[in-house]
Structures are given as C-alpha cells and as structure tokens.
Image (spheres, rainbow, N blue to C red):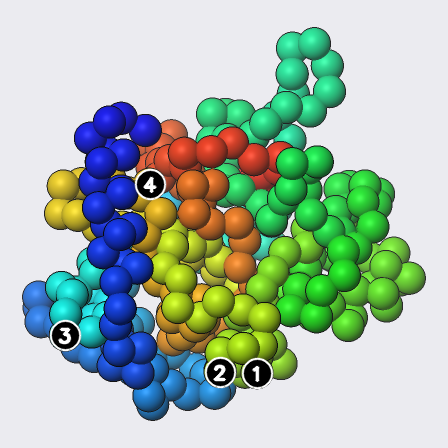
C-alpha cells in the first residue's frame, strides 16, 4: 500500500471507530435514476429474507460474461450516525451456474515445488472466475478442505461456521456446521472449504448471533467483505464490497465497509437462502473474465493460502 493509501486508510479507520448511535444505522442503494433509497435499517432489520429486496435488486447493473456467469455492480451508502458522513460502499456481485461453470479450489504452485501464497495473479489463464477462499491462520487454511474428492484437512470446530461445497454432481451448496459430518460420511463432496461466520441459514434466516451483541460476533466492526451464497434457483452468488472514495478503485482495498449484519442483509436482499463469509479485509479479491478474454479485477492487498476458481465446462 502506498504512503497516500496508508494515510487515508488510517484516517478512515479512525473515523469509523468514533462513537456512534448504532440503532440509527441504515443502508441506502443508488438506483438507476441516481436516487438513493433506504432498503435496510438496523432497528427494523428482518430476521428472515424470503426473497430479494425490490429496490436493491433493481439497482444491480448486470453484465453477461459468458454462458453460466454474469456479474454486476451497485453502490450503497451506509449511514452510521449523525456525527459522521455516509460511508460509500461499492458492491461487485457474480452469479454462477455450476452446471455451466466448473468450480474448484486452487493453490499457487511454487517453482521449487509445493503450494505458495495465492492471489489473482495465480489464477489460470482460462479462469472465468477467481476469488480468495475461506478463512486462514498462519499455518494455512482454517477448517475443512476437500479437493478433487480427497479430504486435505479435517473440519474445524465452530457453531457459526459453514462450508461452501461443490458436490460430485457439480452442485454448489452452503452447508451448515452440523451437516458437515454427514456430508463427510457420504463422500459426496468434490470440493469444499469451511469458513465463518454463517450469514444466512435454513432458508434465508439470520443466525441468532447476528441479531444481538454479546453472542461471539463483533456486530459493529466495518471492513471489506467477501461472501458466497446459495441462491434459491441453485446458482452460486459471490458478493465483494469495496470502499468507494469516488476515485475509481485506487482506494478499493482499504479495509472499511459493511458490518457483518449489513453483509448478511446484503446477500439476503440479493435473494440468497444460505450464505457464509469468506475472508475479507485485505484478503478480499475477485476476478471475472468474459468469453472474449476481457478481464475485470478487484485486487486484494494480501495473498492467501487458497483460491476458488471457475472455468467453463
């Protein structure tokens, strides 16, 4: 990160830590007509999303990338209290049909052998989609990892964890922690990565830990976010948030943006039924490549152990 970006990031993070009235938080979306519309407030947040929010869904500018993959953008304003200006957040979303785009975990290869840190530069040249996958520690990926049907790492323990699973029929699912054991026993996972926290479970339900403080999740912290979720039609949706300073993507990697409950609201309002957070912050990164080879990249500022890559079938 350049000195200018570091200075701006420090100033923004200091502002985000200022005292504020949490119950006043609300999210607005900029529509195609340029008008801002409120679609979520903390004080009236739904505990379950039964389907997409009309205002939010209409604001997405969708673009076809190739058969089975499209992507879009929208801009949100997070109002975080009267003492602070609205925080602008750009959201990039990609919808993937797993029957047409094959998804698999991907690790960077070191010239000397073995796996090295992964970023978008390590994505294969034929990748239609690439993003960082799962949480991790200094020792490597956290939790359950399956690649090509072989378990690489056993599941981690955590009640708010969930696994993004591609099964042996090519379907993509977000599987809650209490269903992982049964899935392991069946041997039907072709690819899997475990992460946390779960953002939606059941059929669009907000987990109890995201509804009130003191249940193990920081509900006020703001950061860049990356989430994967299961749509009701069987497609996978990926949502990446970027701080929007109005100067293009120059400051997009600054780790400032939505809270965890706001991210859950975002994916719920986009029509997701189950969702899990992947690693965000400095790690969050996404690539979409269309059929003509045009590549759209949203860089991260940190390399990670694993990526998730999609290629046309």
Residue 138 relative to residue 182: left or right: left
**Residue located 75% across and 51% down the image:** 144
Residue marked by disc 2? 212
**Residue located 36% across and 59% down the image:** 222
Tell me where residue 81 sits by quadrant. bottom left
Residue marked by disc 1? 208
* Label 4: which secondary element: loop
Q: CA distance from mark 3 to mark 1?
A: 28 Å
* Label 2: which secondary element: loop
**Residue located 26% across and 78% down the image:** 21
Q: Is residue 208 visible?
A: yes
Q: In this orientation, which residue lies closer to the viewer: 173 or 40?
A: 40
CB under 8 Å between callouts 1 and 2?
Answer: yes
Q: Which mark is residue 253?
A: 4
| Dot placed on the residue nearer the N-terminal end, 3 or 1 | 3
Residue marked by disc 3? 82
| Dot placed on the residue nearer the N-terminal end, 3 or 2 | 3
Farthest top residue in view? 112
Q: Position of residue 137 (x, y in %)?
A: 64, 42
* Label 3: which secondary element: loop
Q: Which mark is nearer the camera, 3 or 1?
A: 3
């Amino acid at each position: 990160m350049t000195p200018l970006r570091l200075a701006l990031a420090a100033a923004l993070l200091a502002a985000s830590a200022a005292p504020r009235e949490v119950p006043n938080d609300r999210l607005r979306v900029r529509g195609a007509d340029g008008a801002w519309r409120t679609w979520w407030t903390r004080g009236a947040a739904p505990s379950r999303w039964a389907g997409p929010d009309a205002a939010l869904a209409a604001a997405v500018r969708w673009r076809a990338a190739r058969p089975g993959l499209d992507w879009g953008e929208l801009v949100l304003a997070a109002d975080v209290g009267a003492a602070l200006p609205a925080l602008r957040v750009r959201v990039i979303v990609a919808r993937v049909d797993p029957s047409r785009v094959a998804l698999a975990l991907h690790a960077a290869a070191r010239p000397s052998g073995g796996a090295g840190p992964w970023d978008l530069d390590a994505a294969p040249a034929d990748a239609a989609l690439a993003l960082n996958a799962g949480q991790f520690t200094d020792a490597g990926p956290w939790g359950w990892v399956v690649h090509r049907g072989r378990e690489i790492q056993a599941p981690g323990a955590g009640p708010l964890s969930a696994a993004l699973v591609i099964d042996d029929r090519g379907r993509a699912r977000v599987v809650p922690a209490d269903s992982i054991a049964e899935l392991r026993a069946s041997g039907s996972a072709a690819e899997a990565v475990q992460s946390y926290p779960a953002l939606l479970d059941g059929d669009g339900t907000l987990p109890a830990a995201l509804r009130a403080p003191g249940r193990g999740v920081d509900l006020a912290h703001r950061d860049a976010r990356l989430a994967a979720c299961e749509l009701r039609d069987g497609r996978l949706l990926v949502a990446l948030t970027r701080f929007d300073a109005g100067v293009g993507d120059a400051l997009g990697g600054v780790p400032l943006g939505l809270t965890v409950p706001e991210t859950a609201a975002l994916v719920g309002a986009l029509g997701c039924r189950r969702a899990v957070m992947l690693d965000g912050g400095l790690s969050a990164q996404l690539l979409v490549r269309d059929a003509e080879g045009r590549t759209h990249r949203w860089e991260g500022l940190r390399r990670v152990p694993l990526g998730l890559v999609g290629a046309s079938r």
